[in-house]
Amino acid sequence: MVCPLCAEDGGALIWRGEHLRVIRAQEAGFPAFYRVVWNAHVAEFSDLSATERAYCMEAVALVEQALREHLAPTKVNLAALGNMVPHLHWHVIARFDWDSHFPSPVWAAAQRPSPVAQEDAVRRLLPQVEVSLVHQLALLALP
């Protein structure tokens, strides 16, 4: 079976470097759902060297910081599950107290209907989030 994160980007590609990429996932109800995907096929975070782990987590932090700066979410969720796709990737998800699942995880049952107008307002801000991300990620270098 071909790994889907080896075969394709896994979402809307925001930035690709030599070692990792950042994509915006197409997750209904969560317009600011990003993934930091390690380019090489590894299943676990501990498969990376200490230097690679630091580089990966700096990229995760940059995505989180951009979401906080531009969207002011109630919380940012970070997760690295890989149960469905055993290819190292981190979920970085801006959460809002108005989202359909809050305060539960995005993978839990919805608590209320999706607030379309509020989700659309977040979507309108994503271009500036992504311009900022591209700029910050371009400065990121593997030591």
Image (cartoon, rainbow, N blue to C red):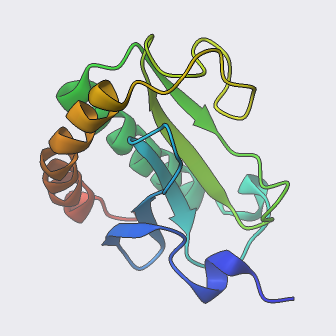
Provide residue 76's location: percent of width, then percent of height: 46, 25
Quick check: can you spot residue 138? yes
Provide residue 46's location: percent of width, then percent of height: 77, 55
**In the rendered view, would you say 52 is above or below 20?**
above
Q: Say left or right for 127 vs 59.
A: left
How many marks can you see? 0
Residue at 55% x, 64% y is: 37
Provide residue 139's location: percent of width, then percent of height: 20, 59
Q: Which quadrant of the figure contains the C terminus? A: bottom left
**In the rendered view, would you say 3 is above or below 107?**
below
Residue at 29% x, 58% y is: 140
Residue at 42% x, 18% y is: 96
Q: Which quadrant of the figure contains the N terminus? A: bottom right
Is 9 in front, or is 18?
Answer: 9
Q: Say left or right for 59 vs 131.
A: right
Q: Say left or right for 106 vs 100.
A: right
Provide residue 87's location: percent of width, then percent of height: 73, 67
**In the rendered view, would you say 69 is above or below 88?**
above
Quick check: can you spot residue 50? no
**In the rendered view, would you say 38 is above or below 56?**
below
Is 90 in front, or is 28?
Answer: 28
Residue at 65% x, 15% y is: 111
Q: Say left or right for 46 vs 100.
A: right
